[in-house]
Image: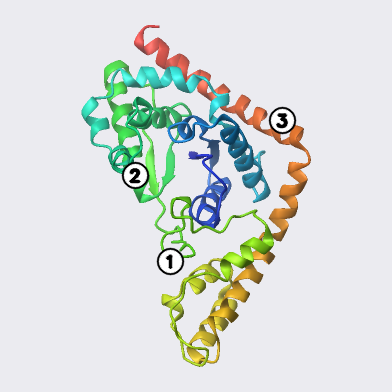
């Protein structure tokens, strides 16, 4: 089974990215033939600073490799290193109904938030379909907010196959209901848009300072507290084992345990959990040629599959 996932390089990755996308993506290595790409073409719909895009792309590569991605088991590559995706995007465009794209929630939501309604933003689902179909992907793990894009991909694949013959594997989506909800410093979903994030590999002192600012209720030190309604505990339990969770829950409910104590415990477990990743990232950062070689090798492996698919699609349409 071939499984495909991708992430946009649109800023420093944070805990929401790690628990929401990175850790589930890394687990794909155990479940099948994993393809994971850095979606820098997609990022161009919102990032128009070339130096920033290059740096963000590089940082995502370092972050994934530091957090445990094994390039011998996962085909890991930059989207822009596989130019076949653009020709396939055009071939898919010739069968994609306008109405299908007009109904996409992502486009309407982004325009409503003030993002310029460009062709790139509008045609984003076709490029995403090409990403998926180019590698004959069987399974695409997504959050519920991305499910529609996989449904669009399925529609396009079926329409192309009906028109020109069986060329593409029709993928299935895998909705990641088990993905953790990661609250930000203010209790909203952790997001760069809300400026409420804790960066994975930011300065350790700055991360601790942010943790100490997490919003809580006003209950005093001696009062019992409900861990299930506390943003600090919601983050702590993402790192903790069963015994650690039980201990903190008991502390909350027993009283004489302040939010300051919980925040310090969160800062400690965060640092302990990410210290090995941070050390690995520094090693990788000091050896850019090694990282570049890994990405180029991933692109070579990806292109071998892409070329076969594109050749079938070209022949099917008469090119």
Question: What residue is at 34 percent from the left and 33 percent from the top?
Answer: 116
**In this rendering, is residue 316 above or below 9?**
above
Q: Position of residue 287 (x, y in %)?
A: 78, 38
Label 2–label 3 contact, CB within 8 A? no
Q: Earlier in the sequence, mark 2 or mark 3?
A: 2
Please give the residue where the numbered disc 2 appears in the rendered image. Answer: 147
In the displayed structure, 170 sits above or below 310; it is below
Q: Return the x and y of residue 240 as percentages of the image width and height.
A: 58, 71
Do callouts 2 and 1 mark residues in contact (Cβ within 8 Å)? no
- x%, y% of residue 179? 45, 57
Nearer to us in this view, 24 or 81: 81
Give whichever of discs 1 and 3 has the lower sequence position.
Answer: 1
Of pointers 2 and 1, the one earlier in the residue sequence: 2
Q: Residue at x 61, y 55 (%)?
A: 200
Q: What residue does disc 1 label? A: 187
Q: Residue furthest top?
A: 319
Quadrant location of residue 37? top right
Dot 1 crowding, Cα within 10 Å, few <14, some 14–19, many 20+:
some
**Which disc number belongs to residue 221?**
none
Q: Is residue 79 left or right of residue 111?
A: right
Q: Secondary structure at mark 1?
A: loop
**Distance CA(mark 1)–CA(mark 3):** 41 Å
């Amino acid at each position: 089974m071939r499984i495909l996932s991708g992430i946009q390089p649109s800023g420093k990755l944070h805990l929401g990215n790690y628990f929401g996308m990175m850790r589930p993506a890394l687990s794909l290595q155990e479940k099948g033939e994993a393809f994971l790409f850095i979606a820098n073409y997609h990022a161009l719909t919102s990032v128009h600073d070339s130096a920033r895009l290059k740096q963000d792309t590089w940082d995502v590569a370092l972050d994934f490799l530091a957090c445990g991605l094994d390039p011998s088991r996962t085909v890991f590559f930059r989207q822009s290193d596989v130019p076949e995706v653009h020709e396939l995007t055009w071939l898919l465009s010739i069968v994609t109904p306008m109405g299908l794209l007009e109904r996409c929630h992502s486009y309407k939501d982004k325009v409503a938030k003030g993002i310029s309604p460009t062709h790139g933003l509008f045609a984003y689902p076709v490029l995403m379909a090409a990403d998926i179909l180019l590698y004959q992907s069987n399974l695409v793990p997504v959050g519920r907010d991305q499910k529609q894009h996989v449904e669009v991909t399925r529609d396009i694949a079926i329409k192309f196959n009906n028109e020109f013959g069986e060329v593409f594997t029709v993928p299935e989506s895998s909705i990641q209901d088990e993905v953790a909800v990661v609250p930000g410093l203010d209790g909203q979903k952790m997001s760069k848009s809300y400026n409420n994030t804790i960066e994975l590999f930011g300065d350790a002192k700055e991360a601790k300072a942010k943790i100490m600012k997490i919003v809580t209720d006003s209950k005093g030190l001696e009062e019992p507290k409900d861990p299930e309604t506390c943003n600090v505990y919601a983050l702590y339990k993402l790192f903790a084992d069963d015994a650690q969770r039980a201990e903190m829950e008991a502390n909350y409910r027993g009283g004489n345990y302040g939010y300051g104590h919980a925040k310090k415990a969160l800062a400690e477990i965060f640092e302990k959990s990410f210290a090995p990743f941070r050390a690995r990232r520094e090693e990788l950062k000091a050896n850019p040629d090694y990282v570049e070689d890994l990405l180029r090798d991933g692109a070579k492996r990806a292109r071998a599959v892409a070329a076969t698919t594109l050749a079938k699609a070209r022949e099917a349409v008469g090119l």
